[in-house]
């Protein structure tokens, strides 16, 4: 970078940007161009550039000089070291950004880089009646469970874990690296304890690390209004020593119904009707998901007439109340008629003239 760019341009901010916004923007760019994360050939130079811009614009006095005289006002008065000194600038701050990003101090000992158990998948099939009423499920999962001998600690009975001497129980170590005028601080998992912070001095003879293969029984409710898709039960997946348990994913498949079709919260049913009943009208009973309901076919009803049964549909997640059931009248037209039947229909037709 032969010529210095405008500091505001470097950080992508305007001249009236407040200090808290400057700091926030710098953090974003620092994460993007930190050499330990960005392996491009220009990352180091970009990082130095945005760091210098931040050091000046975050210091009230230096920013005022820069606004009045540009780079000349700052470079002519301060050395490179002076630019960074006294501005409240600390490259350790970048390290703390990475700690927050990767969970460095969030979990106490073992918090840095805690491993997560894998998710478990269980596929199930439900009926429309289950969608209406919900369904209770009981599963016996084959997974890692706490060792009964050591209660999941991994330690031989009567002993406990000890603090890692390399990281002093933090699960992480800080490594400083000098690069020109800057010092980069990287936070890494402790190799000795694998980021756990604590170590097992006398392992349990049965499990070594606190987990054994076993069976865990769980019960849960699939709510009314459930649909096709994946539903997550947090923390009921595979568990690992000193780690975070994965999730149990319930993959729901709603089976086709022999009588009803579904569209969201509404269901549809076709009822067969003769020409005579459609012409003269009739009271019918039609099936619903909860039994039967009466409908009235008005005289002169046409094929494909729809009759609505309000509130006889399904629950929907995020909706109040239930959908409706729609009954379609399927009028059966005879395919074969005797001569007498044809004459009667002809006489009926002539009577309408």
Image (spheres, grey):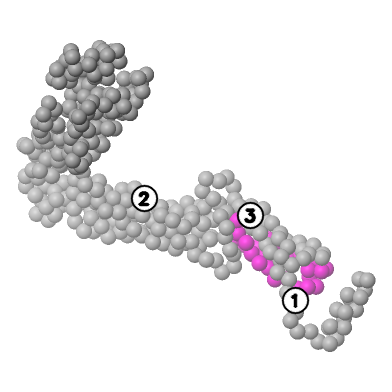
Separation (CA) of disc 2 from disc 1: 53 Å
Residue 298 higher or lower than 352, as above or below: above
Q: Is residue 269 visible?
A: yes
Residue 230 higher or lower than 328, as above or below: above
Q: Earlier in the sequence, mark 3 or mark 2?
A: 2
Q: Earlier in the sequence, mark 1 or mark 3?
A: 3
| Rendered image quadrant of residue 49 | top left
Magenta residues span 266-294
- Assess whether residue 86 is covered by the magenta stretch: no
* Label 1: element kind: loop
Taking depth in this image into account, of 340 and 210 the one nearest to the observer is 340
Pointer 3: what residue? 324
Tell whether 71 sits left or right of 133.
left
Separation (CA) of disc 1 from disc 3: 28 Å
In the image, which disc is placed on residue 233? 2
Tell whether 195 sits left or right of 302.
left
Q: Magenta region's main secondary structure? A: strand
Of circles 2 and 1, the one toward us is 1
Pointer 1: what residue? 333
* Label 2: element kind: strand
Residue occupying image coordinates x 23% and y 36%: 33
């Amino acid at each position: 970078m032969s010529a210095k760019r405008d500091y505001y341009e470097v950080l992508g901010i305007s001249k009236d940007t407040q200090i808290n916004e400057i700091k926030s923007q710098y953090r974003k760019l620092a994460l993007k161009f930190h050499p330990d994360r960005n392996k491009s050939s220009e990352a180091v130079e970009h990082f130095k550039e945005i760091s210098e811009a931040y050091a000046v614009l975050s210091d009230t006095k230096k920013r005022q000089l820069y606004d009045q005289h540009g780079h000349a006002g700052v470079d002519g008065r301060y050395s490179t070291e002076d630019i960074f000194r006294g501005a409240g600038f600390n490259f350790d701050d970048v390290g703390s950004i990475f700690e927050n990003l990767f969970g460095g101090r969030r979990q106490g000992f073992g918090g840095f880089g805690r491993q997560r158990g894998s998710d478990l998948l269980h596929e199930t099939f439900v009926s429309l009646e289950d969608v209406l009423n919900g369904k209770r499920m009981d599963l016996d999962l084959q997974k890692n469970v706490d060792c009964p001998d050591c209660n999941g600690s991994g330690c031989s009975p009567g002993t406990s874990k000890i603090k890692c001497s390399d990281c002093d129980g933090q699960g992480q170590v800080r490594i400083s690296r000098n690069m020109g005028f800057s010092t980069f601080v990287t936070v890494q998992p402790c190799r000795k304890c694998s980021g756990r912070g604590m170590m097992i001095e006398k392992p349990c003879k049965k499990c070594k690390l606190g987990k054994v293969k076993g069976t865990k029984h769980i019960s849960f409710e699939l709510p009314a209004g459930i649909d096709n898709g994946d539903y997550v039960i947090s923390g009921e997946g595979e568990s690992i020593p000193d780690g975070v348990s994965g999730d149990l994913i319930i993959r729901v498949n709603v089976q086709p119904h022999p009588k009803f079709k579904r569209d969201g919260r509404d269901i549809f049913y076709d009822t067969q009707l003769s020409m005579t009943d459609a012409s003269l009208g009739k009271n019918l009973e039609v099936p619903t998901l909860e039994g039967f309901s009466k409908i009235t076919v008005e005289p002169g009803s046409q094929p494909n007439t729809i009759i609505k049964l309000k509130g006889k549909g399904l629950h929907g997640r995020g909706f109040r109340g239930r959908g409706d059931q729609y009954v379609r009248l399927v009028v059966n037209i005879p395919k074969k008629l005797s001569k007498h039947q044809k004459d009667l229909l002809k006489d009926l037709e002539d009577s309408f003239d």
